[in-house]
Image: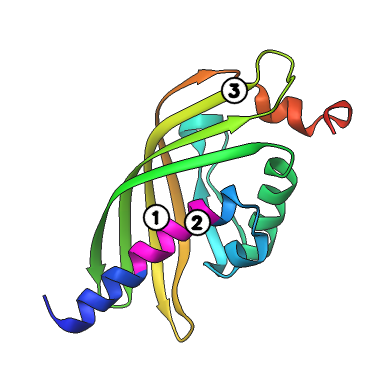
Amino acid sequence: MTEASSTSREEIVATVTNIAHSIDHKRWTDLRGLYAETVKTDYTSLFGGDVQTQTGDALIEAWKKLLSPVVTQHLEGPIAVALRGDEATARCHVRGYHYLKGAAGGDEWMVAGHWVIGLAKTPAGWKVDAMKLETLYQTGNTQLLQVASAPAAR
């Protein structure tokens, strides 16, 4: 491994790690800085529907609206990186814990799975341009996000 690829791998691991920290601490501006101008997201294994392609701004705004009322903790690791020039794929286990005190149907929801994250090297560093969740299972209140987004929950 060359020094350049070692540095890139460290930067990619830091980017993936900072996704979880930024979401959990509700640092939306920091989170936005981790993403490319256009992002493809695939949460079909969790929610059904279609793979989405949208601006990074739209993605983070949607997450902000959805997750602001919910306490979250995302646990990742280990993060495996495959480099291909100015493109990379990072893969890791992820568990997303979601908590909303007093939510109808239960306070907690946990999703276990794998993240497959595509990144592109830009002048500003490595940016996420694709994100897929491969859901293994979930426990608890699977309607928690819908409850959180209802006007009465706020």
The residue that disc 3 covers is: 108
Total number of numbered labels?
3
Relative to 10, is 18 above or below? above
Sequence-wise, the earlier of marks 2 and 1 is 2
- Is 18 magenta? The answer is yes
- Is 20 magenta? The answer is yes
Dot 2 amino acid type = Ile
Mark-to-mark CA distance, 2 and 3: 21 Å
Sequence-wise, the earlier of marks 1 and 3 is 3
Relative to 142, is 132 above or below? below
Mark-to-mark CA distance, 2 and 1: 11 Å
- Is 12 left, or right, of 31 in this rendering? left
Residue 19: percent from left, percent from top: 50, 56
Segment tinted magenta in the rendering: 12-21
Which residue is most to the top? 105
- Circle nearer the viewer, 1 or 3: 3
